[in-house]
Image (cartoon, rainbow, N blue to C red):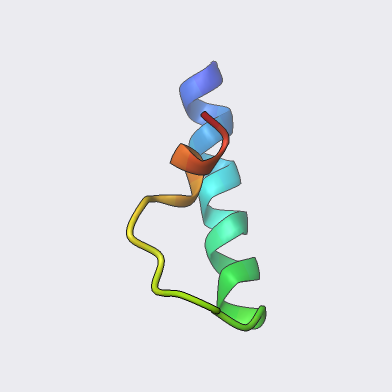
Amino acid sequence: MLRKVLDSGSERMTQLLDVLPKPAPVQARPGEWLL
């Protein structure tokens, strides 16, 4: 279940990152930020 939440959360984070300005290139996946 946690993996499913992270997958859907990653998609939303990716969409947010596409809108927000990027001060630096994102190397890690959005889901890894939560760790």
The residue positioned 54% from the left and 16% from the top of the image is 1
- Residue toward you, 4 or 17: 17
The residue positioned 49% from the left and 50% from the top of the image is 30
The residue positioned 44% from the left and 39% from the top of the image is 32
Pick out the residue farthest to the top: 1
In the displayed structure image, the side of residue 27 where residue 14 appears, left or right:
right
How many tags in the picture?
A: 0
Q: Is residue 25 above or below residue 5?
A: below
Q: Is residue 5 above or below residue 2?
A: below
- Spot occupied by residue 13 in the image (x, y as percentages of width and height): 60, 57
Pick out the residue farthest to the front: 23
Pick out the residue farthest to the left: 27
- Spot occupied by residue 29 in the image (x, y as percentages of width and height): 39, 50
Q: Is residue 24 above or below residue 2?
A: below
- Spot occupied by residue 7 in the image (x, y as percentages of width and height): 48, 39
In the displayed structure image, the side of residue 14 where residue 28 appears, left or right:
left
- Spot occupied by residue 4 in the image (x, y as percentages of width and height): 51, 28
- Residue toward you, 6 or 35: 35
- Residue toward you, 29 or 22: 22
